[in-house]
Image: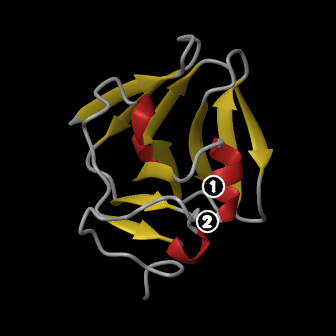
Amino acid sequence: MIREGGCLCGAVRYKAEGEPLNVRACHCRNCQKAMGSPFFARALFPQTALTIEGEIGRYPSSDAIDRVFCKRCGTRLFSWRRNGTAAGVALATFDDRNAFAPTEHIWVSEKIAWVTLDDGLPQYETTIPP
């Protein structure tokens, strides 16, 4: 299966092939700041499963992650692992914004206080235990 998406202005388009490795809502402080939102809802794909067209920018938000965005409109599209393995695709940027739903919450120890998690999904204080 191939799912498509893109930024607000349409200058960047992408295709994600296959099924995601996981779908999570991350509540860590870096994701909050990078997304300008209480959390980052994303589908994790192998980088090899993604095809991107258009001019993107990157910001190294940590030693491990680049935040990828449209250079024209600023839409935040991906969290790109710098080791070349995977990329988190922002769920709301898929053309079908209901294609995926998170199956768990990570980094709830850094969750914004007014966010209530009552969806019954598993919650992890930091990341998923090995």
Q: Position of residue 72 (x, y in %)?
A: 71, 15
| 87 shown above or below 74 | below
Q: Position of residue 118 (x, y in %)?
A: 30, 65
Query: Helix, strand or loop at disc 1?
Result: helix
* Residue 13: mark in rendering: none
| 56 shown above or below 130 | above
Q: Position of residue 101 (x, y in %)?
A: 28, 49
Tell me whether circle 1 and circle 2 mark residues in contact (CB < 8 Å).
Answer: yes
Q: Residue at x 63, y 55 (%)?
A: 31
Q: Is residue 109 left or right of residue 123?
A: right
Q: Which residue is mark 1?
A: 31
Q: Nearer the viewer, residue 104 or 56?
A: 104
Q: Residue furthest toward the front?
A: 114
Q: Nearer the viewer, residue 125 or 129?
A: 125
Q: Residue furthest toward the bottom?
A: 130
In which quadrant of the rendered image does the C terminus lie? bottom left
Task: Name the kind of residue labelled 2 in the image.
Answer: Cys
Q: Residue at x 71, y 50 (%)?
A: 33
Q: Is residue 3 left or right of residue 128?
A: left
